[in-house]
Image (spheres, rainbow, N blue to C red):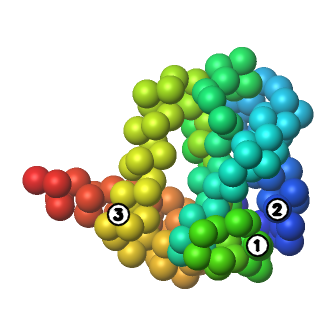
Amino acid sequence: IEPSLPAKTRASVLREMVQLAVKTGRVWDAPRLLASLEAREALSPTGMPGGLALLHTRQPEDYLFESQFIVLGRTVQEVPFGAPDGRATDLFFLLACPDEGLHLHTLARLCLLATATDLLTRLRTAADAREMYDCLVAAEQEVLVQQR
């Protein structure tokens, strides 16, 4: 989790998010991951309403990373990212899931957390990476309670 990405453009967001992913130690081919993310964004932007983007490759590519992970970055300033509501984006998740079922489940789960809780507001006001992580865990708990 990086609470203060300095990125100012779509291209720099992608580069910085890949570098954040590299820090997990699970990325095998960072240049190829970046190229796959760029190709996915060229096909259709992953910006969503509300200032959120869910970065991912077009198809799960198990040769790019060792195992599944998610990284989260919050930019210092909002970045135009092609969201359908026209709003700029400041919260970026990068999903790396070599299994298509897990990939789709993770995308759906993040969308649910973003729409069924005030997660996005909490992530924007969190003071640091630990607090951002705690916001994710709290939102997941809220969704689990709602589903009971």
Residue type highlighted by circle 3: Ala
Q: Check the image and report above or below for 135 versus 39.
A: below
Residue at 76%, 72% in the rendered image: 80
State the residue position of label 1: 80
Q: Nearer the viewer, mark 3 or mark 1?
A: 1
What residue does disc 2 label?
10
Mark before the other along the chain sequence, 3 or 2 = 2
- Mark found first going from the N terminus, 2 or 1: 2
Residue located beneath label 3 in the image = 138
* Displayed quadrant of residue 34: top right
Q: Secondary structure at mark 1?
A: loop
- Name, please, the residue furthest toward the top: 63
Q: Nearer the viewer, mark 3 or mark 2?
A: 2
Residue type, mark 2 in image: Arg
Q: Label 2, label 1: how many angstroms apart (C-alpha)?
A: 7 Å
In this rendering, would 111 be left or right of 42? left
Q: Quadrant of residue 128?
A: bottom right
